[in-house]
Image (spheres, rainbow, N blue to C red):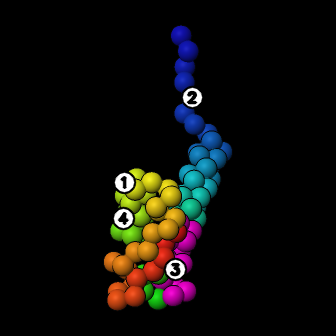
Amino acid sequence: SSSSSPPSGSDYLFGLVWLGAAAYAAYFFLDNAYRIRLQAIDEFGPVIHEFDPYFNYRATEYLYEHGAKKFFTWFDYMVWYPLGRPVG
C-alpha cells in the first residue's frame, strides 16, 4: 500500500509562485492586446480612418464579384462622399 504524504510548505509556495506568474502573464498579454487595439484611437481620436471593417467587407465582395482586374481600377463612389476615392 502506498501512502500519499500531504504537500510540503515548499511545494505549496512553488505552486503559488507558478499561479502568480501565470496570472501576471495573462494580465500582461491582455493589457497589451487592449492597448494595441486602442492605438488608433489614441493616435487619431475616435475617427474611422482605414480601420473600417464594413469597407473591407465591401472591397472583398467587389473583388470576389468582379475579379482582380476591375478591382485594381475600381473608383468607389460610396466612400468619402461626394468625392469618392480610388481603391485599387
Which residues are the magenta region?
Answer: 32-44
Q: Residue at x 40, y 82 (%)?
A: 84
Describe the element under mark 3 as helix, strand or loop.
helix
Disc sitting over residue 5 in the figure: 2
Dot 2 or dot 3: first in sequence order is 2
Do the numbered discs 2 and 3 sit on residues whose CB atoms are within 8 Å? Answer: no
Disc sitting over residue 24 in the figure: none
Residue type highlighted by circle 1: Glu
Considering every residue shown, the one lying at the far top of the view is 1
Do the numbered discs 1 and 4 sit on residues whose CB atoms are within 8 Å? Answer: no
Dot 1 or dot 4: first in sequence order is 4
Dot 1 or dot 3: first in sequence order is 3
Q: Which residue is mark 4?
A: 58
Q: Nearer the viewer, mark 4 or mark 2?
A: 4
Do the numbered discs 4 and 3 sit on residues whose CB atoms are within 8 Å? Answer: no
From this viewpoint, is residue 30 visible? yes
From this viewpoint, is residue 27 visible? no
Q: Nearer the viewer, mark 2 or mark 1?
A: 1
Q: Is residue 78 above or below residue 44?
A: above
Q: Residue at x 59, y 58 (%)?
A: 25
Q: Nearer the viewer, mark 1 or mark 4?
A: 1
* Cα gap from disc 1 to disc 4, whole angstroms: 10 Å
Queried whether the magenta region covers residue 61, the answer comes back as no
* Cα gap from disc 1 to disc 3, whole angstroms: 31 Å
Nearer to the camera, 81 or 57: 81
Residue type highlighted by circle 3: Ala
Q: Which residue is mark 1?
A: 65
Q: Residue at x 40, y 88 (%)?
A: 83
* Cα gap from disc 4 to disc 3, whole angstroms: 22 Å
Disc sitting over residue 40 in the figure: 3
Q: Residue at x 35, y 68 (%)?
A: 54
